[in-house]
Image (spheres, helix red, strand yellow):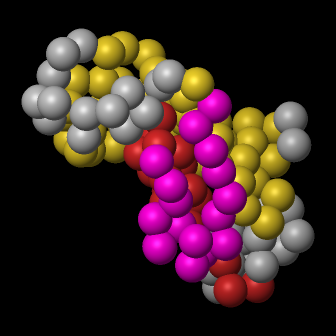
């Protein structure tokens, strides 16, 4: 699975790192910020959601999001490299649950959880 045009337009880089696992990263630019000088929450959600999409679709059958939730712990700044690491928590024939840790270096600053519906192959 390749990055989609939206991920690429935002400057994301990423890859599937194993079955049910993926990693996405972006270096923050001025256009990624909100009015307070930190990364826009929508950008961070999209980064985590992109890792979630790669991880949940790594098995082959199309997986579509049913729900997603994100907690933000700390702010960011221009020049920070942000990485979202997705891992599978549960996988059944019809659903999958994923957790995505969002880091700046070794510092965890956001946590995303998502559930997918897996289409029949």
Residue at image location 37% in from the left, 38% down from the top: 57
Q: In the displayed structure, would residue 34 be above or below residue 104?
A: below
Would residue 68 be found to the left or right of residue 47 on screen?
left
Residue at image location 46% in from the left, 65% down from the top: 4
Q: Residue 53 in magenta?
A: no
Q: Residue 14 in magenta?
A: yes
Q: Nearer the viewer, residue 91 or 68?
A: 91
The residue at the far left in this view is 120
> Can the viewer see residue 47?
yes
> Can the viewer see residue 116?
no
Quadrant containing the C terminus in the rendered view: top left
Q: Where residue 14 sits in the image (x, y, percent)?
A: 65, 51
Would residue 114 be found to the left or right of residue 108 on screen?
left
Residue at image location 24% in from the left, 13% down from the top: 92
Magenta residues (range): 1-17
Q: In the displayed structure, would residue 55 be above or below residue 34?
A: above
Q: Where residue 50 sits in the image (x, y, percent)?
A: 49, 52
Q: In the displayed structure, would residue 31 be above or below residue 87?
A: below
Q: Where residue 80 sits in the image (x, y, percent)?
A: 85, 62
Residue at image location 59% in from the left, 48% down from the top: 72
Please tell me how many numbered marks the rendered image carries.
Answer: 0
Q: Where residue 36 sits in the image (x, y, percent)?
A: 70, 79
């Amino acid at each position: 699975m390749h990055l989609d045009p939206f991920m690429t337009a935002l400057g994301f880089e990423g890859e599937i790192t194993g079955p049910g696992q993926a990693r996405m990263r972006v270096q923050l630019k001025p256009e990624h910020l909100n009015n307070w000088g930190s990364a826009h929450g929508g950008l961070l959600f999209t980064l985590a959601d992109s890792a979630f999409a790669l991880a949940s679709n790594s098995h082959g059958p199309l997986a579509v999001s049913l729900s997603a939730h994100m907690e933000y712990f700390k702010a960011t700044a221009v020049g920070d490299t942000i990485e979202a690491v997705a891992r599978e928590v549960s996988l059944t024939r019809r659903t999958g649950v994923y957790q995505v840790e969002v880091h700046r270096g070794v510092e965890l600053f956001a946590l995303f959880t998502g559930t997918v519906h897996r289409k029949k192959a």
